[in-house]
Amino acid sequence: MFKVGAARVFAEQKSFQETFPDMHDIALQHKAEVAKCERFEFGKNWTAFLAVLDDKRIAKAEDSLKEMAVQLKGEAMSWDKLIK
């Protein structure tokens, strides 16, 4: 039963190009933009980011987020006082 059902599902599936007809054009546009240095190749920006990522930068980012959360909490509390 499963084999027959699975075969039917696979037979009814459309190809990627049929499902997303504009993706080919988007891929060509992306490739042209990379060639003109208007955009990074997929993954290169993450590779560059990871090359400089270390524990010190992570700790600094965590501290920054904590500080922002405290500020936002204070602003929310001030707003609550104003509307009461």
Image: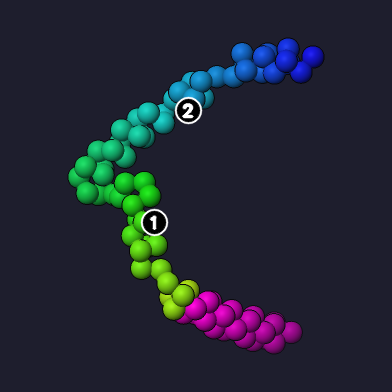
Relative to 3, 48 lies left or right: left
Relative to 2, 7 lies left or right: left
Q: Nearer the viewer, residue 14 or 57?
A: 57
Residue that appears at 33% across and 52% down = 44
Residue that appears at 68% across and 13% down = 8
Q: Element type at marker 1?
A: helix
Tag nearer the camera, 2 or 1: 1
Residue that appears at 35% across and 30% down = 25
- Residue neighbourhood size for the residue with mark 1, other residues' Cα within 10 Å, grouped as few (<14), some (14–19), many (≥20): few
- Image coordinates for residue 20, horizontal then vertical, percent: 48, 28
Residue that appears at 36% across and 68% down = 52
Provide the residue span drawn in magenta: 59-84
Amino acid found under the numbered disc labelled 1 = Trp
Amino acid found under the numbered disc labelled 2 = Phe
Q: Element type at marker 2?
A: loop
Q: Is residue 54 visible?
A: yes
Q: Earlier in the sequence, mark 2 or mark 1?
A: 2
On whether residue 78 falls in the magenta region, the answer is yes
| Residue hosting label 2 | 20
**Image: 83 above or below 54:** below
Q: Is residue 75 visible?
A: no
- Image coordinates for residue 33, horizontal then vertical, percent: 26, 43
| Residue hosting label 1 | 46
- Residue neighbourhood size for the residue with mark 2, other residues' Cα within 10 Å, grouped as few (<14), some (14–19), many (≥20): few
Query: Magenta segment, principal secondary structure?
Result: helix
**Which image quarter holds the C terminus?**
bottom right
- Image coordinates for residue 48, horizontal then vertical, percent: 33, 60
* Residue 79, quarter of picture: bottom right
On whether residue 51 falls in the magenta region, the answer is no
How far apart marks 2 and 1 lie (CA) works out to 26 Å
- Image coordinates for residue 63, horizontal then vertical, percent: 52, 81
